[in-house]
Image (spheres, rainbow, N blue to C red):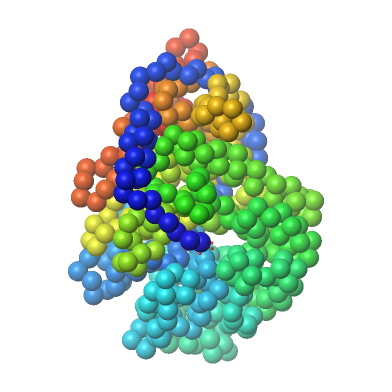
């Protein structure tokens, strides 16, 4: 995709215009009423819905997560301690690796054995950057164990034969005394087999994974899984462009041979040609981004599920939204320092993340995993690094706020909310001013997430309650506020509490805010 950056003058004008649309404007609050049902609306919200994606891309791995054991940056066997601590705090249920587009050009044999003897390759999809293969299977699976996470291995179906994927799995998981691959793994320092719960068969096979027709991909998928002999969930690569026929053909021709099908959905409010920077946007681009999270993602997921339901009424095959998030133009200078797809994150990204979670919570019967793209330094990252420095993005804080939803049972919500409207006439964007999601946690407590989408008006949300609500809220002085290296964070959560009166609670959210509250004494 061609990338054109606006000139400095255009950027300054856009920024000036966008700062007018800050939450600082005093305005009459919108009034919303919320009621929450007591019977679950679906099976539990799988913790893996709060999953991650780690690709060999830019500084996602090298520099971001991995600095090497010799680095002066404090690390554990090469993985930086500051990033590990941040990730452990939010918990990482699952990590997809090594791509993305990179996966279909990756030979696992390049990443095993003595590091000095590993081949050096060029990362063809991401700027021909040097790929030293310093991080390979052993290192990645060490990270999985360091984080108490689960591995989702993205296998190559685009440029290697089925035997390669089958042998990679045997190398990682076999305990047999008769397997040369298991013996090789032991010689390389790992006695015990690893547990690999998820294996992907190709990535975006309609695009960077081989530009295949879905009919051809369905046949290849069937062929590749034949040789896996694995208890891992076999994940077929699905649609990412809103092309229903991809889902249709894969489910019809290969549905019996998969345990999950993927969906990719990126939020690109200004369009792919000229995406614009993460931190420079006006109210129109605010509204379009939220519209994509509320309507676009919901529609993409719901349409895919409808097709899956026709072919698989018993819902044996899960849907994994294994790439999602906002895709902006990279920060200036990022590509020159091999930090491909390095972008900042603001309250806009935070709200998009929160609203995406609400979509996943509504479809728990089918959506069993989702992986934000990506974990560190790439696209809608949770953590950004700069040499030894680290910052947490607003998206990180949303993951943190929504932790109580992991493993919880979704509850039905009825929300009576006014509209938030941007623009006039046929091009107007209309959205609910307030969005909500609720769930009952494993401890029986009810958790409520509220989002005020309106960037100008506070929201007063009233709900029946006999016990106080306690939780945290994310809000910032401007929509464009973001955390910067070496500065006091501009976006961090703060506590929020409300007590019942006459059997009701009224919570006031500032404009453009996300709150997660728990009911209880
Ligand atoms: O996440 C970046 C890229 O987006 C992935 O490599 C690819 O699968 C998708 O197109």
Q: In which quarter of the image is the C terminus?
A: top left
Image point 21% across, 46% down: which residue? Answer: 487
Q: In terms of depth relative to the viewer, which is nearer, 414 or 215? A: 215
Side of 34 where 300 appears, left or right: right
**Does 166 appear above or below 296?**
below
The answer to which of 420 and 401 lies nearer the viewer is 420
**Camera-side residue: 515 or 315?**
515
- Camera sees residue 13: yes
Q: Is residue 364 left or right of residue 507?
A: right
Looking at the image, residue 405 sits to the left or right of residue 223; the answer is left
For the question of whether residue 372 can be seen, the reply is no
Relative to residue 455, is residue 96 depicted above or below?
Answer: below
Q: In which quarter of the image is residue 218?
A: bottom right
Task: Name the foreground residue: 455 vs 490.
Answer: 455
Displayed quadrant of residue 283:
top left
Q: Residue 190: percent from the left, percent from the top? A: 43, 79
């Amino acid at each position: 995709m061609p990338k054109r950056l606006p000139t400095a003058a255009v950027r300054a004008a856009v920024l000036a215009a966008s700062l007018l649309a800050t939450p600082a404007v005093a305005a009459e609050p919108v009034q919303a009423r919320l009621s929450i049902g007591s019977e679950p609306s679906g099976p539990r919200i799988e913790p893996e819905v709060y999953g991650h994606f780690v690709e060999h891309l830019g500084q996602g791995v090298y520099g971001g997560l991995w600095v090497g054991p010799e680095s002066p940056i404090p690390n554990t066997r090469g993985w930086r301690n500051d990033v590990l601590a941040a990730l452990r705090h939010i918990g990482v249920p699952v990590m997809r690796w090594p791509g993305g587009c990179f996966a279909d050009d990756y030979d696992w044999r390049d990443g095993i054995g003595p590091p000095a003897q590993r081949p050096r390759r060029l990362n063809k999809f991401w700027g021909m950057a040097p790929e030293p293969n310093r991080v390979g299977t052993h290192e990645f699976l060490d990270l999985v164990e360091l984080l108490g996470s689960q591995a989702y291995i993205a296998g190559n179906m685009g440029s290697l034969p089925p035997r390669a994927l089958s042998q990679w799995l045997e190398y990682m998981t076999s305990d047999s005394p008769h397997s040369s691959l298991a013996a090789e793994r032991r010689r390389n320092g790992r006695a015990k087999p690893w547990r690999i719960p998820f294996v992907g068969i190709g990535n975006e096979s309609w695009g960077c994974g081989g530009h295949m027709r879905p009919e051809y991909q369905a046949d290849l998928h069937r062929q590749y899984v034949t040789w896996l002999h694995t208890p891992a969930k076999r994940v077929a690569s699905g649609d990412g462009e809103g092309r229903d026929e991809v889902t249709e053909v894969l489910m019809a021709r290969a549905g019996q041979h998969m345990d999950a099908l993927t969906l990719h959905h990126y939020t690109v409010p200004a369009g792919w040609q000229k995406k614009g920077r993460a931190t420079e946007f006006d109210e129109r681009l605010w509204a379009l981004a939220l519209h994509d999270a509320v309507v676009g993602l919901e529609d993409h997921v719901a349409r895919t599920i409808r097709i899956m339901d026709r072919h698989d009424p018993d819902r044996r095959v899960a849907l994994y939204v294994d790439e999602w998030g906002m895709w902006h133009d990279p920060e200036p200078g990022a590509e020159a320092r091999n930090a491909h797809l390095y972008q900042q994150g603001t309250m806009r990204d935070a709200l998009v993340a929160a609203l995406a979670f609400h979509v996943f919570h509504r479809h728990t019967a089918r959506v069993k995993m989702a992986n934000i793209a990506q974990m560190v330094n790439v696209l809608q990252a949770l953590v950004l690094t700069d040499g030894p420095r680290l910052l947490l993005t607003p998206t990180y804080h949303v993951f943190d706020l929504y932790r109580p939803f992991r493993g919880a049972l979704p509850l039905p919500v009825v929300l009576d909310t006014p509209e938030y409207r941007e623009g006039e006439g046929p091009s107007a964007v209309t959205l609910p001013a307030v969005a909500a999601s609720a769930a009952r946690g494993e401890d029986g407590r009810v958790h409520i997430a509220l989002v005020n989408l309106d960037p100008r008006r506070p929201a007063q949300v009233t709900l029946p309650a006999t016990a106080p609500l306690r939780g945290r809220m994310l809000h910032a002085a401007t929509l464009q506020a973001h955390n910067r290296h070496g500065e006091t964070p501009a976006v961090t959560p703060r506590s929020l509490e409300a007590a019942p009166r006459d059997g009701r609670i009224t919570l006031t959210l500032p404009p453009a805010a996300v709150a997660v509250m728990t009911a209880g004494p």
